[in-house]
Image: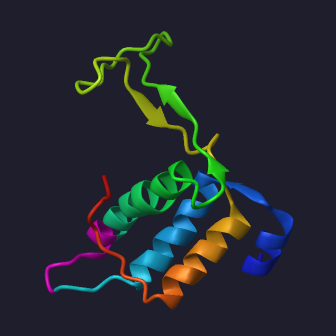
Amino acid sequence: MRFSQFVARNENVSLTDIIPWLQLIYFNAHNWDVDDSIPNVLYSKRKYVISNVLEYNIDKGIIEGKLVYEYICDDEGNPCAIDPDTEEFATELNLDKSYVNIKSLTNHLANDIEDGIEAPDKIKK
């Protein structure tokens, strides 16, 4: 399926489906060093896309979408992990249930690319 067909058919796309595409975009924008390996760069770009591009921008309202967090549970379904900072049950992002508006994301990426996209490996806090 071509990207234009994908955008036309799907307004909201799960993060599971969009992360590999974004990962490749930022992979291609990577400033390569001698020590870089393809698996390490792909892994770092995945983390960057999830944290900086999707979570940060959806949370701030820059990109339309919804993030769904679920408790980290044991085998019986009971919350089991404690976040050391808040001392509450820890949560993790559910990539299947979370989604992003593909048109909003595309506009954001087009503006980033126009401004000379730089894809660092550092994660915003």
Taking depth in this image into account, of 72 and 90 the one nearest to the observer is 90
| Residue 24 shown left or right of residue 98 in the figure | left
Give how far across and how far down residue 36 sits, in percent. 20, 78
Colour mode of the rendering: rainbow
- The residue furthest left is 35
Membership of 39 in magenta stretch = yes
Which residues make up the magenta segment? 34-41
When the figure is inspected, residue 89 is found, relative to residue 30, above or below; the finding is: above
Residue 37 figure quarter: bottom left
Give how far across and how far down residue 66 sits, in percent. 63, 45
Look at the image and tell me whether residue 2 can be seen. Answer: no
Residue shown at 36% from the left, 77% from the top:
119
Name the quarter where the N terminus is drawn.
bottom right
Residue shown at 52% from the left, 48% from the top:
59
Membership of 4 in magenta stretch = no
Residue shown at 53% from the left, 65% from the top:
20
When the figure is inspected, residue 87 is found, relative to residue 15, above or below; the finding is: above
Give how far across and how far down residue 101 sits, in percent. 70, 59
Taking depth in this image into account, of 94 and 115 the one nearest to the observer is 115
Give how far across and how far down residue 63 sits, in percent. 60, 60
When the figure is inspected, residue 122 is found, relative to residue 36, above or below; the finding is: above
Residue 47 figure quarter: bottom left
| Residue 36 shown left or right of residue 67 in the figure | left
Residue shown at 28% from the left, 18% from the top:
87
